[in-house]
Image (cartoon, rainbow, N blue to C red):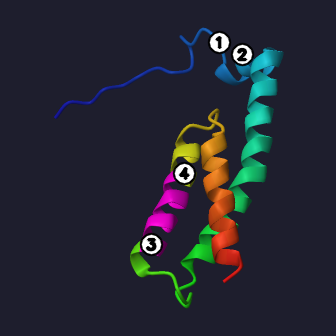
Amino acid sequence: MLIVVMDYGRNMSSNRLIDILDDDEKLNNLNEDYHYRQSVFPRLEKLRKVIWDENIAGITNDEQDKDLNFVQDLKSYLNTTPHRRITKSEMKKCNQLWRKYKNV
């Protein structure tokens, strides 16, 4: 049996939280990303719920699944890369989906 003991406290050169908070540019970027995500994610979730409704007449299940996958993939990608923004084409696609499903 091998036991490894690591000493974390004494040999650390700096505290990462302090490094980030001392850099105003990094802090502003973090706040900007946070506020962007707070405005985009609820809208994408609302779109996902509208598409998820299974009682939509005139729209095939395959088409609905494709649209739902697009929104879920977009949310997932934005969640894993917080500094990324929605592109113009993705925004247009989301707007088209919103009009398509909201007016049914």
Residue drawn 68% across the image and 67% down it: 98
- Residue 58, x across and y down, in percent: 52, 86
Count residues near mark 1 (Cα–Cα under 10 Å), then give few for <14, some for 14-19, many for 20+. Answer: few
Judge by depth and name the residue closer to the eye, 67 or 78.
67
Residue placed under numbered mark 1 in the picture? 14
For this orientation, the residue located farthest to the left is: 1
Per the rendered image, the range of residues in magenta is 63-74
- The kind of residue on which mark 2 rests is Asp
Q: Which mark is residue 74?
A: 4
Q: Residues within 10 Å of mark 4 (few under 14, many from 20)?
A: some
Q: Is residue 71 magenta?
A: yes
Q: What label does residue 63 carry, if any?
A: 3
| Vertical arrangement, residue 17 with respect to residue 33, above or below | above
Mark 2–mark 3 Cα distance, whole angstroms, equals: 48 Å
Asked whether the beta carbons under mark 2 and mark 3 sit within 8 Å of each other, the answer is: no
Instruction: Name which residue type carries label 1.
Output: Ser
- Mark 4 or mark 3, earlier in chain: 3
- Identify the mark nearer the N-term, 3 or 1: 1
Residue at 41% over, 22% down: 6
Between circles 1 and 4, the one closer to the viewer is: 4
The tag earlier along the polypeptide, 1 or 4, is 1
Residue 86 in sight = no
> According to the image, label 2 marks what residue?
19
Residues at discs 2 and 1 in contact (Cβ within 8 Å):
yes
In the image, what residue occupies the spot 54% across and 51% down? 74
Q: Disc 4 marks which amino acid?
A: Leu
- Where residue 83 appears, as percent x and y from the top left, is 64, 32
Magenta stretch prevailing secondary structure: helix
Residue at point 66%, 18% (across, down):
15
Q: Nearer the viewer, mark 4 or mark 2?
A: 4
Marks 4 and 2 in Cβ contact (< 8 Å)? no
